[in-house]
Amino acid sequence: MKYIKFFLVGILFGIVMSKAEIISWFRIYEMFKFQSFHMYGIIGSAVLLGMVSMYFFRKNVVKTFEGNEIHVAPKKRGLYRNLLGGTLFGLGWALAGACPGPMFVLVGKGVVSILVVIFGATLGAFLYGLFKDKIPH
Amino acid sequence: MEYITQPWAWYVAGPVIAFIMFLLFYFGERFGVSSNLETFCSIGGAGKFTDYFKIDWKQNSWNLIFVAGAIAGGFIASNWLSPSDVVALNPQTIQDLSDIGIANAGATYLPDEIFSIDTMLSVKGFFVLLIAGLMVGFGARWAGGCTSGHAIVGLSNLEIPSLISVIGFFIGGLVMTWFILPLIF
């Protein structure tokens, strides 16, 4: 039962990704062409409201439903990791027109070919695990 | 109901995504989809190849459930909440895509030139899909996060690593969109 809330949040995520057309390859292309404000408005407003959330977490105004403090662990530092990894991710994002979240939503939409992309992404994560000690971070 | 079935504006979608992030923190977890890719590897036995995947993946079960919900949400939205699949693109975008060999942009959510079954079953089409996935998966784990973990959570938390990653996302995305996509089709 403790997992059902995550399933429901996931459903909300799938619906918003679909209804706001974030799962559309064309919206991602349009974004990288700077021909629409749509995606920038979505990410920008989510981040602005996210900052407000973070402020309340830091001040301990909001705790988890179990009463624990919410600690947001910092991301790992490293110029190569973030810049090179990010750039590789961006190349894939613009080609697939989907980042990991939308890939799964597209499965629900019934897009068979996205399974090849998800297989590739899983293989990519596996290859990272294999070679991570040989690449710069 | 009309408010739900029409496409949602950015000022609806952005706050809903922020609310999803908030809920996951409130439930004691953290929004980040690409870590599931590593969980898949661990479940599939990748720990036999490298210790990196020897993790107790059950602690990530909540995230797998979240992904299952995302699939269900996609099904619900496309079957019952979307009377139309048309994406109202900028006319210039449609023209630009036509120029590089992608027809009927915006008539559906996805271009047939990449996602149709026929394309998937061609050698070139299959490798386009596979390589796109490979770059997303390898890149996301190298950078330590994807759009959710870095662009939404990380930027909200004012983290420099996330800012650098998002700059990387855009360097890669712009190079693909402006220079490589025109060569593919």
Image (cartoon, coloured by chain):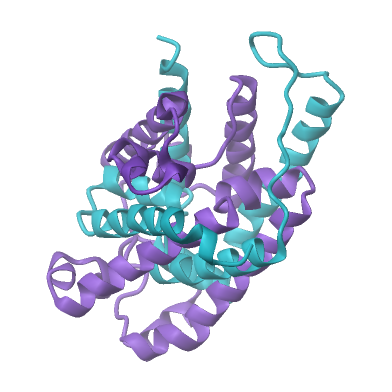
Chain colours: A cyan, B purple
Q: Is residue A45 above or below residue B100?
A: above
Quadrant housing the N terminus of chain B: top left
| Number of residue marks | 0
Mark yes or no: residue B88 visible. no
Give the residue displayed 55% in from the left and 66% down from the top: A135
- Residue A1 rendering spot, x and y as whole percentages: 40, 9
Picture coordinates of residue B79 (x, y %)? 26, 40
* Vertical side of A63 occupied by B124: above or below: below
Whether residue A113 is visible, yes or no, is yes
The answer to which of B8 and B32 lies nearer the viewer is B32
Placement of A5 over or under B24, stated as above or below:
above
Using the rendered view, name the quadrant where residue B64 is placed: top left
Q: In this view, does B117 lie to the left or right of B12?
A: left
Name the image quarter holding residue A54. Answer: top right
Image quadrant containing the C terminus of chain B = bottom left
> x and y percent of residue B130 in the render?
29, 66
Question: Relative to residue B1, is residue B104 drawn left or right?
Answer: left
Relative image position of residue A127 (x, y in whole percent): 39, 59
Depth order, front residue of B49/B98: B49
Question: Which residue is located at x 76 percent, y 19 percent?
Answer: A62
Closer-to-camera residue (A57/B79):
A57
Residue drawn at point x = 20 percent, y = 54 percent? A112
Instruction: Tell whether A94 sits left or right of B120.
Output: right
In the image, farthest residue toward the right: A59
Q: Which residue is drawn at 36% across and 62% down?
A: B133
